[in-house]
Amino acid sequence: MEDAGRIPVIRVGVLGLITISVYGSWYYAFGVLLDAIILDTGWEEPVLTTAFAGSLLVGGVGSLAGGLILDRLGSRLVFGVAALLGLVAFQVAGLTESSAVFAVAVALGGGAYAALGFYHVTQTAAVRISPEASVKAIAVLTIWGAFASAIYIPLAAWMVDNSGWRPTLRILTMTAAVALIFGALVVDTRVEKAPRARLVVSELRASLRRPATRRFVIAVALIGIGVSTILVYQVPAMTAAGLSLGAASFWAGFRGFAQLGGRLPLMPIVSRLGIAGSLRLAVGAITFGILVLAVAGTTWLAAIYALVAGFGIGALSPLQGMRAQEVFGASSLGTAMGLLTFLFLVAGAIGPAVAGVIASATGSRALPVAAGAAATLGAALLLRSPNRADEGPGPSKAPHPGLTEL
């Protein structure tokens, strides 16, 4: 678990800016925009939550291709395509008067950002540019990422109050496009000899034959359902329980900042509990936090939600990357992380879509949130400590040829 080398601070910082803006501008900000869009347009809540779910679905499917392209052709192409697609799609979404056009546009724009800019890309890129300090690079990158909701949720709330949801959506998502363009210029993970797609997929299949790996990927899917539900409903659930929009946005943003509580002490936790045990702790914290969110109508309950869920979600992202490198190996890491993101987002698309239906049918926003806790509880039960036979011999940890020269 110890890294001997140093990380390229500036390039990892650029990957951090991409992570902050790509997650923050749509994935986190949508929960703030939801009620403002309904009030302004009259569009029904299930239509909007399904549109958000559509962006997760497109992002999940696209992440498989994004991970494979990253493994073979490098990060510049991935970031450049994400910037172009996201910029055009979200400008259309912010201008249209049609709910159907809005749904298609945000599905494409959010899907592009998710498929080509989420952690499966930035963590893999961080590993590739830090071959002698991969764990450290993941840890530092995800500390940057902890600021995504802390910055974008309060910013989105302020902009919605002062300018309305349309300029807010267009401007916030434009910042992600700018960061992606900057990343395409600064970070290059191409190798002298790209691995053949067949070899990458073969290593991935070998890893998936192990029971511990299969439990891990199923758990990631269940976590996706729970996390996507709370990200959409954390602000609406708190306002429905009695908090003002400003207070709910503050605590939702603070929940993002509280992710540092799961990332700064992560290495001592991993040293004591191991990666699998640390994952169980993180998912257990998320489950408890979701249950508190369902009734978070007071400052104290909102604070407990923010601190506990923030710790769990904060630890989750780097631990998933560490576990993926551990069970899948380095040469197929981009494709493996793409697979995990596919499962996380496609399964996660179920959460907001079903939650919107439950909320519309019952008039309650606590019930769909509580349903998300059931999914993460199932994930925690799957993430039991593996034994040696369960784990198998493991894939090779050697990086791509040429990576050490980057």
Image (cartoon, grey):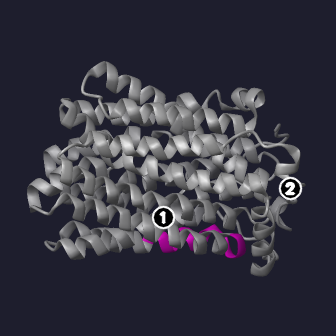
State yes or no: residue 279 in magenta.
no
For mark 1, what is the residue? 346
Q: In the rendered image, is residue 259 in sight? A: no
Residue at 17% from the left image edge and 46% from the top image edge: 363
Q: Is residue 350 toward the left or the right of residue 203 in the image?
A: left
Q: Is residue 179 toward the left or the right of residue 34 in the image?
A: right
Q: Is residue 205 toward the left or the right of residue 262 in the image?
A: right
Residue at 63% from the left image edge and 40% from the top image edge: 140
Write the start and end of the magenta stretch as one range. Answer: 71-83
Q: Amino acid at mark 1?
A: Val
**Vertical side of 252 occupied by 396: above or below:** below
**Vertical side of 123 occupied by 379: above or below:** above
State yes or no: residue 79 in magenta.
yes
- Can you give x and y, in whole percent of width and height, for residue 291 in the image? 39, 33
Given residues 313 and 366, the one toward you in this image is 366
Tell me the number on the disc at residue 297: none
- Snapshot quadrant of residue 144: top right
Q: In the rendered image, is residue 166 in sight? A: yes
- Snapshot quadrant of residue 366: top left
**Vertical side of 349 occupied by 256: above or below:** above
Contact between labelled residues 1 and 2, with CB atoms less than 8 Å apart: no
**Vertical side of 95 occupied by 349: above or below:** above
For mark 2, what is the residue? 394
Q: Is disc 1 placed on a helix, strand or loop?
A: helix
Q: How many C-alpha atoms fall within 10 Å of the one at disc 1: few (<14), some, or many (≥20)?
A: many
Residue at 16% from the left image edge and 74% from the top image edge: 98
